[in-house]
Amino acid sequence: MEFPASLEAVYHRIDTFDPVTYARTRNFIDGGVSYISPYLSRGFITVPGVLIRLKNRGFSFSELEKFIQELAWREYYAKTWFRLGDGIFQDIRHPQEGVLHHGIPAALVHAQTGIEAIDEHIARFPQTGYLHNHLRMYIASLACNVAHYHWSGPAAWMYYHLLDGDLASNALSWQWCAATFSNKPYWVNQENINHYTHREQRNTLVDCSYEELPYLAFPDIFKEKFDFTPQEPNIPFQVPQINPDLPTFVYSHYTLDPNFHAKEKGNRILVMEPSHCKRFPMSPRSIQFIVELAAQIPDLQVYYGEYADLDCCGTFRDHPILAHWQGNREAYPFLAPDLIGDFPSFFSYWKPLMKRLEKGWSNNFQPVEDGNLSFL
Ligand SMILES: Cc1cc2nc3c(=O)[nH]c(=O)nc-3n(C[C@H](O)[C@H](O)[C@H](O)COP(=O)(O)OP(=O)(O)OC[C@H]3O[C@@H](n4cnc5c(N)ncnc54)[C@H](O)[C@@H]3O)c2cc1C
């Protein structure tokens, strides 16, 4: 799957998306998934924006329900990030049980797990920058529960390569699989992998029953660790030219929305902070994708430096990675911005959100100025 950096291309993707096929086939490797996550993660499109666009195509709430529920996972994770800040990078609810290693298992990164469906996709992953959700879950299950690695190492490796890299969806999905943000570990066996990837492979290290999986001996192939040395980011930038008579609109690689104050005249700057990029490295391909999306915003200047050194009072869309920025902070677009709190599970968040959306569907809810939805 290609991810062209253009608003027309992503609108076309949403306008031809079939939510009914999605609900039926999304767990299969060749299922009708939307492939819009790289655009959502970069803030190039927003969840409320996608929903309104699909609603305007005439779908009923029930036709879209499964897809909206998946989008709600993204919001649930984003809200958890807003609430916990850096707390999402530690085991949240329980310590990960049975950890024997920190770091990244080399056999995984080198596509040598012996599980064909996984190895083939991992081998291409640095080029594709994308993995189907089920594959991500399989990989997390193998790394954390079969190989007994702490989730944080392999999560950082996966984030590095993903074009849709989103620290909340990434860390919290890994924690969900490792049972540090859920109540039980996610296990997968070969039968499940074969079913969803259309294979008939046998005799792999997970070719056993679900009852047997927790008692597997630590597989020797996972002993060796991968030396993860991320490439230094090579971000093209110029020292931004700021016209002091105009407002300054500041973007991050999580809030790259071409519609943000698009009708106003102003300085426009994408700020990529070295302190952040060093802590959470992204592959050259991911950075290239960000720069290509940024090029879609007219007159946007790319600045690789700390926001504080810019010495300007910018207007920007709020985001957890921008907690330290000073200036005019505008709301991050959510389906239900006031639905906040410590929800004990995704479904305790989803239930009230679903009720509101269902009601809003008949009342014809609309997006409001800042991109959030109005349910009036
Ligand atoms: C271990 C692991 C790591 C992950 N890391 C990331 C990440 O860094 N960035 C990221 O965007 N997603 C991540 N996900 C979530 C999910 O895999 C991707 O969002 C999804 O596969 C993207 O493909 P799509 O747009 O075709 O998805 P679709 O199936 O078409 O789903 C539509 C949208 O719903 C949201 N969504 C679907 N499933 C999930 C989910 N489990 N969690 C959160 N949002 C979801 C995404 O915004 C996605 O774009 C991860 C999942 C796992 C299990």
Image (cartoon, rainbow, N blue to C red):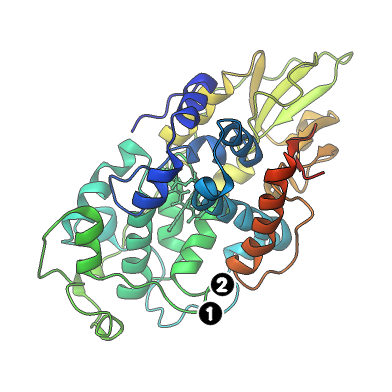
Judge by depth and name the residue closer to the eye, 370 or 232: 370
Reading the image, the residue beneath label 2 is 91
Q: Is residue 339 above or below residue 326?
A: below
**Mark 1, secondary structure of its residue:** loop
For badge 2, the amino acid type reads Asp
Point 31% across, 36% down: residue: 127
**Mark 2, secondary structure of its residue:** loop
Where is residue 344? Give x, y as percent.
Answer: 64, 73
Q: Is 273 on the left or on the right of 31, as rendered?
A: right
CB of mark 1 within 8 Å of CB of mark 2?
yes
Q: Is 35 on the left or on the right of 333, as rendered?
A: left
How would you rate the neighbour count of disc 1 (Cα within 10 Å): few for under 14, some for 14-19, many for 20 or more? some
Check the picture and name the quadrant holding the C terminus: top right
Q: Is residue 196 above or below residue 177?
A: above
For badge 1, the amino acid type reads Pro
Res. 81 image quadrant: bottom right
Q: Is 295 on the left or on the right of 104, as rendered?
A: right
Res. 303 image quadrant: top right
Q: Is 21 on the left or on the right of 334, as rendered?
A: left
Label number found at residue 95: 1
